[in-house]
Image (cartoon, helix red, strand yellow):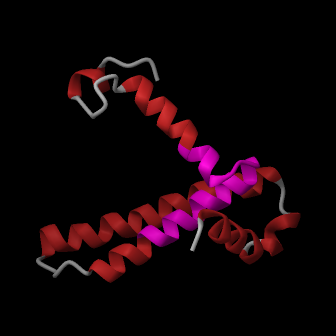
């Protein structure tokens, strides 16, 4: 599946939301991301603190749900997933001049 195919899938799946206001779409994106990120964190909490076995399929399913909300947010902002990747690439390339994460560059940054 390509980025565009998945993007189109999300847009079609969320088509009932097309009548929603911009604010409602932004809230859906933010609250959806928070909820799904919480599910990822909850899964890892149970692994690291409650002795549950790591479930790769569950983890990937939750990451997929996060991806859905990221794409929905892109659609709301009228940008492609590729545009978002480029925006993030430029930001992180500017921040980490060495080409990889360093604590020093992370703590001494403009953005």
Seen in the image, is 43 located left or right of residue 7? left
**Residue under the point 20% across and 78% down:** 54
Q: Position of residue 69 (x, y in %)?
A: 59, 62
Seen in the image, is 38 located left or right of residue 42? right
Find the residue positioned furthest to the right: 19
**Residue under the point 72% across and 69% down:** 8
Q: Position of residue 25 (x, y in %)?
A: 73, 57
Seen in the image, is 54 located left or right of residue 24? left
Q: Is residue 8 magenta?
A: no
Image position of 106 with respect to 13: above or below:
above
**Residue under the point 60% across and 63% down:** 3
Image position of 105 with respect to 42: above or below:
above
Please state the extent of the stretch shown in magenta in the rendering.
Answer: 63-85
Q: Is residue 81 magenta?
A: yes
**Residue under the point 39% across and 70% down:** 39
Using the image as rendered, state which of residue 80 and residue 106 is in the foreground: 80
Q: Quadrant of residue 43?
A: bottom left
Find the residue positioned furthest to the front: 2
Seen in the image, is 63 located left or right of residue 44? right
- Dominant SS of magenta comes to helix
Q: Position of residue 55 (x, y in %)?
A: 25, 81
Q: Quadrant of the N terminus?
A: bottom right
Image position of 91 with respect to 56: above or below:
above
């Amino acid at each position: 599946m390509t980025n565009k195919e998945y993007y189109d899938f999300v847009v079609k799946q969320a088509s009932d939301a097309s009548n929603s206001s911009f604010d409602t779409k932004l809230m859906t994106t933010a609250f959806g991301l928070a909820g799904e990120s919480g599910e990822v964190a909850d899964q890892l909490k149970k692994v690291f603190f409650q002795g549950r076995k790591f479930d790769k399929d569950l983890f990937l399913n939750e990451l997929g749900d996060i991806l859905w909300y990221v794409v929905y947010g892109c659609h709301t902002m009228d940008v492609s997933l590729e545009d978002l990747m480029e925006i993030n690439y430029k930001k992180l390339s500017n921040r980490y001049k060495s080409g990889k994460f360093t604590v020093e560059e992370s703590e001494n940054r403009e953005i």
